Image: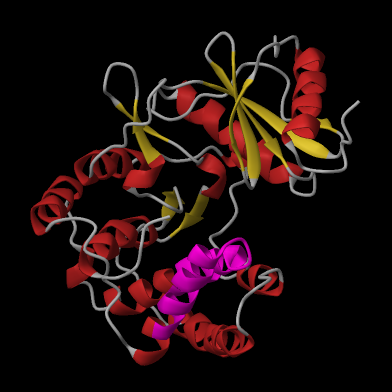
Amino acid sequence: MADRAEFTEASTRATLESAAATVGIDANGAELLRLGSHAVYRLRDAIVARVARTAADVASYRREIGVADWLESVSYPAARAVHVDQPVVVDNRVVVFWQSISDRQDYGTPADVAHLVKQLHALDAPASLDLPQLEPFTRVMPRLDAAIGLDEADRAYLVERLPELQKAYAGLDFVLPAGVIHGDASVGNVILDQSRQPILLDLDGFAIGPREWDLVVTAMYYDSFGWHTKAEYDEFTKIYGFDIMAWPGYETLRSIREYLMVSWLSQKAGESEKFANEVRMRISSLRNGESRKGWNPY
């Protein structure tokens, strides 16, 4: 019998099988797709299951299912939760079942992101969802505290920089109306379904906040990192109808998002030399005001 205390393929498969049996889903022959922050499995009947490491944040998974059900009810093109009683808690882990979107992983374009975000920003979330207010910095210190392998001087820099950015964020004068936001609207969270239609993924970051938060990601992917072309960014702004780079607060918000990308990646510094080198390079570019064009997407 698998030791369910360890987050391994054997233990997560055992957890999955127990959870699936609870809600009447067939998990026989489940295919492990990846084992990271979650264990992700492909099941029969076009179902994908995600097994979380702990059940500590079960409320957020419950909210994510609620978001998925709401978006389905208004025919918004997003990931669909399987219609069973979930999330399921087994072995002090959370298991969630999603409808498979495609057998391939073909990502969308900046234009697809613009269409999806514009459509999302036109929606009013029902009060029953109880979406939280956006709090950009809540996960920073837990991530830094858990960042094994992070250089102590780099950790100190990130810790010292945090209150400066918190103050800068509090001073921003947003011009778009606040409302429902995705939280991480980028091409990495848009995948094409079997009919080549773009579908929005990763619904766990939904919140109420400034719409600029969703727009700055595509802007910085073009402006900071060179991951998008000027033509792609121009099309993005034309479709959405607002160019965040022309807003006076853009550079401040861009700096905040860059910092958050680094603090997120810092958790992986101890996993491999590849990640450690990337984290060191990113922190150096923040500290010294160097180009971000060398950052690699993750």
Viewer-side residue, 73 vs 217: 217
Counting every numbered tag in the picture gives 0
Q: Is residue 268 above or below residue 141?
A: above
* Residue occupying image coordinates x 26% and y 71%: 293
Q: Is residue 266 magenta?
A: yes
Residue 243 is one of the magenta-drawn residues: no
Residue 272 appears at what percent x and percent y? 57, 62
Residue 251 location in percent, x, y?
Answer: 29, 78
Q: Which residues are magenta?
A: 259-284
Q: Nearer the viewer, residue 281 or 273?
A: 273
Q: Quadrant of the N terminus?
A: top right
Residue drawn at (60%, 85%) of the image: 159
Horizontal arrangement in the rendering, residue 165 relative to residue 17 (left or right): left
In the picture, which quadrant includes the C terminus?
bottom left
Residue 196 in view? yes
- Please state the horizontal and vertical placement of residue 120, each as a whole percent of the image: 36, 40
Q: Residue at x 73, y 20 (%)?
A: 85
Q: Quadrant of residue 108?
A: top left
Residue 280, relative to residue 51: is it above or below?
Answer: below
- Residue 4 position, x and y percent, is 87, 36
* Residue sticking out furthest to the front: 273
Main secondary structure along the magenta-highlighted residues: helix
